[in-house]
Image: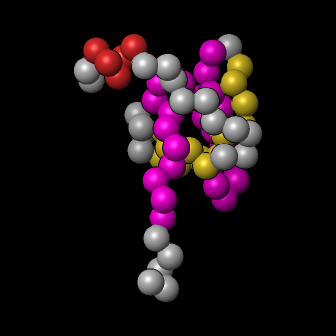
Amino acid sequence: MSTRQRNAPAYRPHVGELVLDRRTGRTGIYMDTIGGEHYLRPEGGGREWAAEPHHVAPAPETRDSAD
C-alpha cells in the first residue's frame, strides 16, 4: 500500500449500500459504523461482520449475465 493510500480518507458508505471488504474479498450490505468499525451483512442475509473502514470500498459493478 502506498503512503498516499494509507493517508487517504476511508470510504464512507451509505446505509444499505453494497460494498466490498477488501481484506476478505466479500461483498456485503453496509449496516452501520460502531466503535470505528463498519458492520456489513451478506447480501442474502446472515450474520454481520466487522470491517475496518480503510478495507471497505464501493462494490465493483456487476455485468448483467444477459449481455
Rendered position, 42 above or below 9: below
Q: Is residue 6 magenta?
A: no
Rendered position, 25 above or below 12: below
The reply to whether residue 13 is visible in this rendering is yes
Asked where in the image residue 47 lies, by quadrant, the reply is top right
Residues in magenta, as a range: 36-62
- Asked whether 47 or 37 is in front, the reply is 37
Rendered position, 16 above or below 9: below
Picture coordinates of residue 67 (x, y %)?
44, 84
* Rendered residue at 46%/29% (across/down): 55
- Asked whether 24 or 57 is in front, the reply is 57
Q: Is residue 59 magenta?
A: yes
Picture coordinates of residue 11 (x, y %)?
54, 30
Please state if 5 lies on the left or on the right of 43 as rendered. left
Please state if 25 lies on the left or on the right of 64 as rendered. left
**Scheme of colours in the image:** secondary structure
- Asked whether 8 or 31 is in front, the reply is 8
Picture coordinates of residue 27 (x, y %)?
53, 48
* Rendered residue at 52%/43% (across/down): 58
Picture coordinates of residue 25 (x, y %)?
41, 44
- Asked whether 4 or 60 is in front, the reply is 4
In the image, farthest residue toward the left: 2
* The N terminus sits in image quarter: top left
In the image, farthest residue toward the bottom: 66
Give the total number of marks visible in the rendering.
Answer: 0
* Rendered residue at 70%/38% (across/down): 14
* Rendered residue at 39%/14% (across/down): 7
